[in-house]
Image (tube, rainbow, N blue to C red):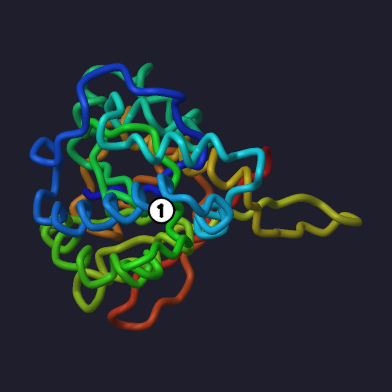
Amino acid sequence: MLILLPPSEGKADAGTGRRWNPDRLSLPELNPARERVLDALVALCSGPDEAQARAALGLSEGQRGELRRNARLRVAATAPAAQIYTGVLYEALDLASLPATAQRAARRSILISSGLWGAVRLADRIPPYRCPIGARLPGVGALSAYWRPVLAPALVAAAGSGPVLDLRSGSYAATWTPRGELAERTVTVRVLHEREVDGVPVRSVVSHFNKATKGRVVRDLLVAGARPRTAAELIGTLRELKHTVVEQEAAAGRPRQVDLVVTDL
């Protein structure tokens, strides 16, 4: 099973070890594309036009420290991606507290999308950075469009013959859409909050809390040692783990879509 996660805007303040080395990253076929984005990002953030750099990255004036950090990425200390990403999803997943067998499964199965790196595994050492997928970099352009042709063969290979649980947010999901037979092995998840309004159950999409729910779902799968062989088995496993799952109709050759219904946020 391949589990695709979004990165988090919240990241560790600093790395703790050696400098970034592209030769040590997973998916080495992405390295030329990674180098091009990194060069463009460092040049932008170390250049004289701070306003242009902040606009390109969607940063406020109070976040100018992110520019200084980006400018030093090639010499910055690194840490495993599992420690770099610290947002709501990763807090709920709480990788450090997983049993050893679940941690090994996480390192094998999880890929994290990234505007800078394309995709990384949990053990890949990277420095903290700021480079959202919605950014446009000089010489590179819109990152979502840039990564699309590069990521496709790498993620198809990473998926192998098993199911894919795609928990990426919309902007990161736009960088790769599985097609054909692989799409039919892919399960995408929407989180809905159910509450009563005048005695009638009402379901609505949640934003912030959907990240925590997705983190808990991945944790549950890892702790249970789940090894589904098909999308149907994956959906069945979620139900066995006491998640309320409602499957939507999907066209042939498109990912299977499920709603995960929660009553507590």
Which residue lies at the image location 35% right of the left edge and 51% below the top edge?
43
Nearest the camera: 55 or 28? Answer: 55
Which residue lies at the image location 27% right of the left edge and 34% below the top edge?
126
Is 115 drawn above or below residue 91 in the view shown? below
Is 29 drawn above or below residue 147 in the view shown? above
Task: Answer with the quarter of the image where residue 19 lies.
Answer: top left
In percent of width and height, residue 57 lies at 51, 54
Q: Crowding at label 1, few (<14), some or many (≥20) Cα neighbours within 10 Å? A: many
Nearest the camera: 7 or 75? Answer: 75
Is 186 drawn above or below residue 17 in the view shown? below
Instruction: Look at the image and tell me whether residue 124 can be seen.
Output: yes
Nearest the camera: 28 or 174? Answer: 28
Nearest the camera: 12 or 173? Answer: 12
Left or right placement of residue 26 versus residue 210 in this view: left
In percent of width and height, residue 79 lies at 29, 25
Left or right placement of residue 257 versus residue 178 in this view: right
Q: Quadrant of the C terminus?
A: top right
Task: Answer with the quarter of the image where residue 130 lies.
Answer: top left
Instruction: Look at the image and tell me whether residue 114 can be seen.
Output: no
Residue type at mark 1 is Leu
Left or right placement of residue 213 versus residue 235 in this view: right
Q: Which residue is mark 1?
A: 44
